[in-house]
Amino acid sequence: MISVALVRHAKSDWGDPDLPDHDRPLNERGKRDAPAQAARMVFTGFWPEVILSSTAVRARATAQAFADEFGADVDLQPDLYGASAGVLLRAIETAGLAGAASVMVVAHDPGITDLAYLLSSERIDHMPTCAMAAFDWEDDDWHLIDFAQPVTWWFQPPE
Protein backbone atom coordinates (compact mmCIF):
# COMPACT_ATOMS: atom_id res chain seq x y z
CA MET A 1 0.00 0.00 0.00
CA ILE A 2 1.19 3.53 -0.78
CA SER A 3 -0.13 6.77 0.72
CA VAL A 4 0.01 10.46 -0.11
CA ALA A 5 -0.94 13.45 2.03
CA LEU A 6 -1.40 16.92 0.63
CA VAL A 7 -1.21 19.95 2.92
CA ARG A 8 -1.69 23.54 1.87
CA HIS A 9 0.54 25.88 3.87
CA ALA A 10 -1.08 27.55 6.88
CA LYS A 11 -2.37 31.13 6.82
CA SER A 12 0.36 33.66 6.06
CA ASP A 13 1.03 37.18 7.22
CA TRP A 14 0.40 40.00 4.73
CA GLY A 15 1.44 42.74 7.19
CA ASP A 16 4.59 43.86 5.35
CA PRO A 17 3.77 44.86 1.75
CA ASP A 18 7.50 45.16 0.95
CA LEU A 19 8.21 41.56 1.88
CA PRO A 20 8.63 39.28 -1.14
CA ASP A 21 5.90 36.62 -1.41
CA HIS A 22 8.43 33.83 -0.87
CA ASP A 23 9.43 35.33 2.49
CA ARG A 24 5.99 35.81 4.05
CA PRO A 25 5.79 34.06 7.47
CA LEU A 26 2.77 32.50 9.12
CA ASN A 27 0.35 34.81 10.87
CA GLU A 28 -1.01 34.03 14.35
CA ARG A 29 -3.82 31.85 12.97
CA GLY A 30 -1.31 29.93 10.84
CA LYS A 31 0.95 29.39 13.85
CA ARG A 32 -2.04 27.84 15.68
CA ASP A 33 -3.48 25.84 12.75
CA ALA A 34 -0.30 24.08 11.62
CA PRO A 35 0.48 22.21 14.86
CA ALA A 36 -3.22 21.57 15.48
CA GLN A 37 -3.63 19.99 12.04
CA ALA A 38 -0.46 17.95 12.54
CA ALA A 39 -1.87 16.61 15.82
CA ARG A 40 -5.14 15.74 14.05
CA MET A 41 -3.26 13.84 11.38
CA VAL A 42 -1.83 11.49 14.00
CA PHE A 43 -5.34 10.20 14.66
CA THR A 44 -6.00 9.47 10.97
CA GLY A 45 -3.36 6.77 10.83
CA PHE A 46 -1.33 8.53 8.14
CA TRP A 47 2.34 8.62 9.09
CA PRO A 48 4.67 10.31 6.60
CA GLU A 49 8.00 8.70 5.85
CA VAL A 50 8.93 11.72 3.74
CA ILE A 51 7.76 15.34 4.04
CA LEU A 52 8.39 17.44 0.94
CA SER A 53 7.98 21.19 1.19
CA SER A 54 8.21 24.34 -0.85
CA THR A 55 11.05 26.60 0.24
CA ALA A 56 8.66 29.50 0.95
CA VAL A 57 8.84 30.55 4.60
CA ARG A 58 5.13 29.86 5.24
CA ALA A 59 5.33 26.37 3.70
CA ARG A 60 8.54 25.52 5.57
CA ALA A 61 6.99 26.56 8.89
CA THR A 62 3.88 24.49 8.17
CA ALA A 63 5.95 21.47 7.15
CA GLN A 64 8.08 21.82 10.28
CA ALA A 65 4.98 21.65 12.50
CA PHE A 66 4.15 18.29 10.90
CA ALA A 67 7.78 17.14 11.08
CA ASP A 68 7.87 17.96 14.80
CA GLU A 69 4.70 15.91 15.37
CA PHE A 70 5.97 12.90 13.42
CA GLY A 71 9.69 13.08 14.21
CA ALA A 72 10.45 13.41 10.49
CA ASP A 73 12.78 15.54 8.42
CA VAL A 74 11.59 18.08 5.88
CA ASP A 75 12.98 17.83 2.35
CA LEU A 76 12.91 21.41 1.00
CA GLN A 77 12.41 21.53 -2.75
CA PRO A 78 12.59 24.90 -4.55
CA ASP A 79 10.52 23.56 -7.48
CA LEU A 80 7.50 23.17 -5.18
CA TYR A 81 7.12 26.94 -4.73
CA GLY A 82 4.15 27.84 -6.93
CA ALA A 83 4.24 24.38 -8.49
CA SER A 84 1.54 22.96 -10.72
CA ALA A 85 -0.26 19.73 -9.88
CA GLY A 86 1.98 17.94 -12.36
CA VAL A 87 5.19 19.14 -10.71
CA LEU A 88 3.84 18.18 -7.28
CA LEU A 89 2.86 14.74 -8.56
CA ARG A 90 6.31 14.14 -10.06
CA ALA A 91 7.98 15.12 -6.76
CA ILE A 92 5.72 12.70 -4.86
CA GLU A 93 6.40 9.90 -7.34
CA THR A 94 10.16 10.52 -7.15
CA ALA A 95 10.10 10.28 -3.35
CA GLY A 96 8.00 7.12 -3.55
CA LEU A 97 10.25 5.52 -6.14
CA ALA A 98 13.21 6.28 -3.83
CA GLY A 99 11.64 3.92 -1.30
CA ALA A 100 9.02 5.79 0.71
CA ALA A 101 5.60 4.19 1.12
CA SER A 102 3.99 7.37 2.50
CA VAL A 103 4.76 10.86 1.20
CA MET A 104 3.47 14.22 2.41
CA VAL A 105 3.80 17.40 0.38
CA VAL A 106 3.30 20.93 1.72
CA ALA A 107 2.75 23.45 -1.04
CA HIS A 108 0.64 26.26 -2.46
CA ASP A 109 -2.49 26.96 -4.43
CA PRO A 110 -3.54 26.54 -7.11
CA GLY A 111 -1.33 23.44 -7.55
CA ILE A 112 -2.23 21.74 -4.26
CA THR A 113 -5.98 22.14 -4.88
CA ASP A 114 -5.60 20.99 -8.48
CA LEU A 115 -3.82 17.83 -7.33
CA ALA A 116 -6.39 17.15 -4.57
CA TYR A 117 -9.12 17.59 -7.20
CA LEU A 118 -7.42 15.08 -9.50
CA LEU A 119 -6.74 12.46 -6.82
CA SER A 120 -10.22 12.76 -5.28
CA SER A 121 -11.96 12.31 -8.64
CA GLU A 122 -13.14 15.93 -8.56
CA ARG A 123 -14.60 15.79 -5.03
CA ILE A 124 -12.11 18.19 -3.39
CA ASP A 125 -12.45 21.47 -5.23
CA HIS A 126 -10.76 23.78 -2.71
CA MET A 127 -7.94 23.33 -0.22
CA PRO A 128 -8.17 26.21 2.24
CA THR A 129 -5.02 27.22 4.08
CA CYS A 130 -3.74 24.37 6.26
CA ALA A 131 -6.25 21.87 4.85
CA MET A 132 -5.11 18.25 4.65
CA ALA A 133 -6.12 15.46 2.30
CA ALA A 134 -4.72 11.94 2.21
CA PHE A 135 -5.07 9.10 -0.28
CA ASP A 136 -4.24 5.37 -0.14
CA TRP A 137 -3.72 2.90 -2.99
CA GLU A 138 -3.56 -0.88 -2.60
CA ASP A 139 -0.99 -1.15 -5.37
CA ASP A 140 2.65 -0.26 -4.68
CA ASP A 141 3.23 1.26 -8.12
CA TRP A 142 3.85 5.01 -7.74
CA HIS A 143 3.32 5.50 -11.48
CA LEU A 144 -0.39 4.66 -11.04
CA ILE A 145 -1.39 7.37 -8.59
CA ASP A 146 -2.28 9.97 -11.21
CA PHE A 147 -4.89 7.78 -12.88
CA ALA A 148 -5.76 4.89 -10.53
CA GLN A 149 -8.51 5.52 -7.99
CA PRO A 150 -7.36 5.49 -4.36
CA VAL A 151 -9.03 2.84 -2.23
CA THR A 152 -9.56 5.34 0.58
CA TRP A 153 -9.16 9.07 1.03
CA TRP A 154 -10.09 11.81 3.50
CA PHE A 155 -10.13 15.60 3.66
CA GLN A 156 -9.78 17.80 6.76
CA PRO A 157 -9.86 21.61 6.73
CA PRO A 158 -8.60 23.36 9.86
CA GLU A 159 -11.17 23.84 12.61
Image (cartoon, rainbow, N blue to C red):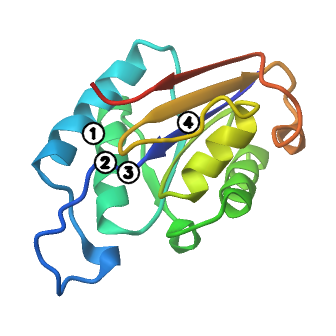
Give the residue at x 75% y 58%: 90
Q: What amino acid type is highlighted by mark number 2?
A: Ala
Mark pair 3, 2: CA separation? 4 Å
Q: What numbered label is drawn on residue 34?
A: 1
Observer-side mark, 4 or 1, equals 1
Q: In this rendering, would 89 be left or right of 22?
A: right
Give the residue at x 44% y 47%: 8
SS for callout 3: loop
Question: Disc 3, disc 4: CB below 8 Å?
Answer: no
SS for callout 4: loop
Q: Residue tagged by mark 3? A: 9
Counting from the top left corner in percent of width and height, residue 138 is at 82, 18
Mark pair 2, 4: CA separation? 21 Å
Disc 2 or 4, which lies upstream in sequence? 2
Give the residue at x 59% y 39%: 125
Disc 4 or 1, which lies upstream in sequence? 1
Q: Residue tagged by mark 4? A: 49
Observer-side mark, 3 or 4, equals 3
Question: Disc 1, disc 3: CB below 8 Å?
Answer: no
Q: What amino acid type is highlighted by mark number 1?
A: Ala
Question: Disc 2, disc 1: CB below 8 Å?
Answer: yes
Q: What amino acid type is highlighted by mark number 4?
A: Glu
